[in-house]
Structure formats: C-alpha cells, structure tokens
Image (cartoon, rainbow, N blue to C red):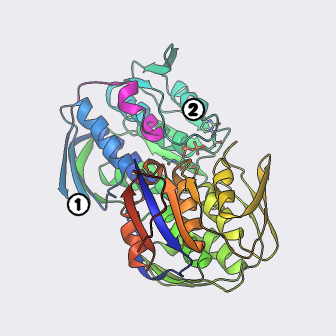
C-alpha cells in the first residue's frame, strides 16, 4: 500500500497545466466502438480510469495503442463481442457507456453493472428508459447484468425525468447509428456532453444541440475514423483553483476554458479570493481570511457536485458558519468524517453540511473515501500545519494525472511512499 506524506501550511504558488477531461475521455473511448476505422484521440490524461476503459476495449477485440503519453490510437474494426463481464467493468462506474456503444454497434449489449465511486444508490433507470423507447428489449438478469437487444435501434423522443450525464451520453451513443431521429429533452449540459457529441460529429455523426435543453440526433449510415483532441478537465481545474484559494496561494491555472469555471470563479470571489480570467487560463489568489458562504450543487452550469468536497474543505477555515447542500447525489458526504480528523467542525444533516469555520486545520492521518473526497483530503493536508498522511490513494489515481508532480511544482511538500509503518515521516 502507498500513502502520501504532505507537509502543509505553505501557500501554493506557480503555474499548473490542466490535463484532458476524465469524464469526456471515458465517454469518447467507448464511443470509438461505433467508428469504422482508426480514431486518434489526443490530450488523453494518464489516469487509472483511462487504463481501465482501454483494457476493456482491448478485451473486446479492439486495437488500442499509446502513440505518445497523451495520444491513443483506437481501431475497433475487429471487435466482435458485445459482452462486458463484471471482471471487466467492476473498477469503473462509467463502463455503463458500453451499453449505448455496444447497442449502437451490434444492436445487442450484455453489460455487467459497474463499480466506481459509491455515493449510495446509483440507478440507471433513465438510461434504460431511453433505450426502451428506441426499441430495445431490456432483460435484467441475476448477477446484476443487463441483456439489451433490438432488431434495429430506432430514433425516439425521450424525456429524462432526472438530469443525468450518463443517460444523456448513453442515449447519444445508441442514437448516432439508429434509424431516424432521436430527440433528448431535459438532457445534462455538462462540457463533457458537448465534447462527446463533438467527437462523434467529427467522425460523421449528426448531433445538434448538445449543451442546450434539447439534443437532436439524426441517425447516419456509418462513422469514419479521424483525429480528436479532448477538452481540458474543469473538475481538475476547479480542484487547483480551490486549493490555491484555501492555501492563500497565487496560482495560474493554464489550459482551461474559463466559461466552464464560472460557478467556481464566482464562489471563490464571494469568499474573498481574487480570480482573473484570461483566454485559456485563470489566475487565483487567496485571501488571509475567507468569508463564509452557501454552496448548493446542481447540474451544469450549477456548482459541480464533483467539487463539493473541495468547497466544503475550503469553507472549513472561513470566519463563520457555511452551508453546503448536495442536490445531485443522495449520499456524498462520506469524506466528512475523515476531513474532521484535520480539526474541521462539520456536521451533516440530510443533504446539507454545516461548517463552523475554524482558524486553522492541523495535520492528521486520513483516508480517501472516493475520488473527489480523496482530493479533499490532499487539500486539507496542504492547508494544515505539520505532516499529514493520506491513505487509499487508488481513488485519486483514478482521476488526477500526475497529482503529486503538479502539486510539487506549485511548491507543495508532498511525496508518495510505501506504507510499511505507522510512523509519520517528514515530507520534503
Ligand atoms: C457523472 C460523473 C460524476 C458526476 C455526475 C454528476 C462521469 C463518469 N461521472 O456521473 O463524476 O458526479 O455525473 O455530475 O461522467 N440518476 C437516476 N437515474 C439514472 C441516472 C442517474 O436517478 O438513470 C440520478 C443519480 O442517482 C444521481 C443523479 O441522477 O442522483 C445524477 O447522476 P448522473 O448525472 O447520471 O451521474 P453519472 O453519469 O453517474
């Protein structure tokens, strides 16, 4: 097992460059199943979730080659299996995209239900509702897998009862090669929805309206190969922005789309930080004292649920009482018990965390409970005086490319070590 040693209390300073978006690329890679020919995907982050989805495609029979550290060539011509077993999908929630992609390719998909971050119940009823409306017969089988099949997928008018990123992308995947026109009403509008649509369009699909209230997909005969570059990761960018504000640092966050950051930018300004926007960069400067605030997570363009743990951590040192309401997931405060080890005073009641701001966090030993909760532990350790130890790093490795290296470049005293003993070592 590995752990991070973080000697905190130093403001982050310098520049950080944001990698390709995890949540876009893990939709785009399964989408290559629909393409006849080679897809060259650029700006692919080197994170464990990408390794997992590339392994799944390889096991299905695709040729997947790493051309350089951020470019992948995928050719799915020889894929002849429509079955993704539990062993293949267990490490990644978003392997549900195999349902839409395999259905689009073969009119058939047998996909086991995946793993990933556990935020309580994570239903796929909206995905299945969309598929059913497109003529798919859905069999829910014992051992938790879905057997989906259709004679021919047909376009349909689909209204989602809940705004769902996964269901929106999944139905887009199923619809691009379907017969006729599919209309998705009440879709999710996250930047990665638009990116997956842009990828599919650049390979010959006909998708209009991604990022708006209605998406219209006209089925086409086939998709062709090509080259596509993944958008920057707004969750990674928000992570560094909030870390800069929380450590009273001064950080230039490069290679981002400032428009994607609006909810984060305005929240940092609201608590007293300074944010300056450039064409493809944002500069964040913290403040000696942060003012308390209310945060409510919402689907995009609202405040991202994936940054909720980091917002809560930031507010833990504000001068007063803050409230953070989680309105996307039923249960996304598991990390709070770990965070309170650093001396924060946070209580959770239902969907809302009440945060009594403290002067300073102190060093602690804590574990990552999930991907973004893990990032919150790293952030708390950076804010705290003394050396902290962070465990269960597999969670952060799923979604942050070169996390320690990027933080080190910002002056963080952080190192990853094998966990042989319980002794706290100095991180230099
Ligand atoms: C994606 C993101 C995740 C982010 C979430 C919300 C990926 C790989 N993951 O997850 O990081 O936190 O969007 O921005 O992109 N729901 C249903 N029925 C469904 C589908 C969803 O009730 O069929 C509910 C969920 O339980 C949840 C809410 O809708 O409460 C949002 O879920 P959804 O947008 O689907 O999240 P994911 O796509 O799984």
Decide if ligand 1 comes within 8 Å of the CB at mark 1. no
Q: Residue at x 58, y 78 (%)?
A: 247
Q: Secondary structure at mark 1?
A: loop
The residue positioned farthest toward the top in the image shown = 142
Would you name the residue on which mark 2 appears? 124
Lower position in the chain sequence, tag 2 or tag 1:
1
Quadrant housing the C terminus: bottom left
Q: Which residues are magenta?
A: 79-96
Q: Residue at x 39, y 66 (%)?
A: 415
Around disc 1, counting alpha carbons within 10 Å, would you say few (fewer than 14), some (14 to 19), or many (20 or more)? few
Above or below 46: residue 247: below
Instruction: Answer left or right for 353 relative to 160.
Output: right
Looking at the picture, tell me which residue is in the foreground, 99 or 329.
329
The answer to whether residue 54 is seen in the rendering is: yes
Quarter holding residue 302: bottom right
Q: Quadrant of residue 292?
A: bottom right
Picture mark count:
2
Q: Position of residue 72 (x, y in %)?
A: 23, 53
The residue at 32%/26% (across/down) is: 106
Q: Is residue 427 left or right of residue 140?
A: left
85 part of magenta stretch: yes
Measured from the top left, where is residue 241 in percent x and y? 54, 74
Q: State whether residue 17 appears in this view.
A: no
Q: Which residue is mark 1?
A: 69
Q: Residue at x 55, y 77 (%)?
A: 244
Q: Is residue 366 magenta?
A: no
Q: Quadrant of ligand 1?
A: top right
């Amino acid at each position: 097992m590995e752990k991070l040693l973080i000697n905190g209390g130093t403001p982050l300073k310098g520049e950080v460059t944001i990698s390709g978006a995890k949540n876009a690329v893990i939709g785009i890679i399964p989408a290559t199943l629909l393409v006849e020919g080679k897809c060259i995907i650029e700006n692919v982050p080197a994170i464990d979730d990408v390794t997992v989805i590339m392994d799944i495609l390889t096991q299905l029979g695709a040729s997947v080659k790493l051309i350089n550290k951020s470019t992948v060539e995928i050719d799915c011509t020889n894929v002849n299996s429509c079955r993704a077993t539990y062993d293949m999908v267990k490490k990644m929630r978003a392997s549900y995209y195999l349902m839409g992609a395999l259905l689009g390719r073969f009119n058939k998909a047998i996909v086991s239900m995946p793993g990933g971050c556990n935020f309580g119940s994570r239903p796929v009823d909206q995905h299945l509702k969309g598929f059913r409306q497109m003529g798919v017969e859905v069999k829910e089988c014992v051992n938790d897998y879905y057997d989906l099949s259709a004679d021919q997928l047909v376009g349909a008018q689909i209204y989602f009862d809940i705004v769902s990123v996964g269901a929106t992308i999944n139905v887009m995947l199923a619809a691009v090669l379907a017969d006729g026109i599919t209309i998705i009403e009440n879709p999710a509008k996250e930047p990665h929805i638009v990116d997956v649509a842009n990828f599919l369009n650049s390979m010959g699909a006909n998708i209009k309206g991604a990022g708006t209230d209605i998406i219209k997909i006209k089925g086409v005969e086939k998709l062709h190969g090509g080259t596509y570059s993944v958008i920057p990761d707004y969750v990674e960018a928000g992570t560094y922005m909030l870390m800069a504000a929380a450590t009273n640092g001064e950080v230039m966050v490069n290679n981002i789309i400032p428009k994607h950051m609006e909810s984060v930018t305005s929240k940092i300004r609201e608590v007293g930080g300074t944010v300056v926007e450039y064409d493809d960069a944002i500069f964040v400067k913290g403040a000696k004292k942060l003012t308390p605030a209310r945060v409510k997570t919402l689907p995009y363009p609202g405040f991202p649920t994936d940054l909720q743990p980091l917002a809560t951590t930031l507010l833990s040192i504000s001068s007063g009482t803050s409230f953070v309401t989680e309105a996307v997931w039923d249960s996304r405060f598991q990390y709070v018990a770990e965070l309170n080890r650093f001396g924060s005073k946070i209580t959770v009641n239902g969907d809302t965390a009440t945060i009594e701001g403290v002067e300073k966090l102190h060093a602690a030993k804590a574990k990552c409970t999930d991907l973004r909760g893990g990032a919150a532990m790293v952030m708390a350790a950076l804010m705290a005086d003394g050396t902290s130890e962070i465990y269960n790093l597999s969670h952060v490795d799923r979604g942050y490319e070169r996390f320690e290296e990027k933080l080190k470049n910002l002056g963080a005293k952080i190192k990853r070590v094998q966990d042989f003993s319980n002794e706290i070592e100095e991180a230099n």
